[in-house]
Image (spheres, helix red, strand yellow):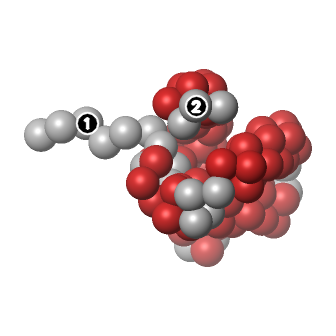
Amino acid sequence: MAARAIIDVDHFRHMTGNDQALQAEIVQLFRAQAELWARLLIPDAPVQTWEDSCHTLKGAARGLGLWALADACEDAEELARAGAVSGPGVSRALGRVRAKLAEALDALPEFAEASGR
């Protein structure tokens, strides 16, 4: 089974009408916002804080075709909805979100090079 790409480039191109200027702007906005979201993804924060961050990040990730990041965010959200507010499960889930976010941010320059930007 082939590994799934970090960024579904075809999806992102479709969502942006293959407008390279728009793609560059979205990637730039995602990078800027990711810094804010990452600061809120801590298990000691109030549950509403990290849950809201995961929810927002999930939507942005889906728009870019960052499926693994979106899935990690959804898993963390499900913990919050189930009433988990702290503990090792929350720490693992938020650690996974942070790891997938870092992976996505590392992959974005590859996307820019592949798209000729």
Q: Secondary structure at mark 2?
A: loop
> Which quarter shows the N terminus?
top left
Relative depth, front residue between 10 and 86:
10
Give amino acid for label 2. Answer: Gly
Mark 1 burial class by Cα count in 10 Å: few <14, some 14-19, many 20+: few
Question: Which image quadrant for residue 16?
Answer: bottom right
Relative depth, front residue between 42 and 103:
103
Q: Which residue is mark 2?
A: 116
Q: Which mark is residue 3?
A: 1
Left or right: residue 59 versus residue 107 is right
- What is the C-alpha distance between the residues marked 2 and 1? 24 Å
Left or right: residue 8 versus residue 96 is left
Left or right: residue 60 versus residue 31 is left
Q: In the rendered view, tell whether residue 57 sits above or below residue 31.
A: below
Mark 2 burial class by Cα count in 10 Å: few <14, some 14-19, many 20+: few
Tell me if residue 20 can be seen.
Answer: yes
Question: Looking at the picture, how far across and down is residue 13, in whole percent?
Answer: 52, 56
The structure residue drawn at horizontal position 66% and vertical position 49%, both measured from the top left corner, is 20
Question: Looking at the picture, how far across and down is residue 22, in whole percent?
Answer: 73, 55
Q: Tell us which disc is closer to us: 2 or 1.
A: 2
The structure residue drawn at horizontal position 50% and vertical position 30%, both measured from the top left corner, is 114
Q: Residue furthest left?
A: 1
Relative depth, front residue between 71 and 9:
9
Relative depth, front residue between 4 and 86:
4
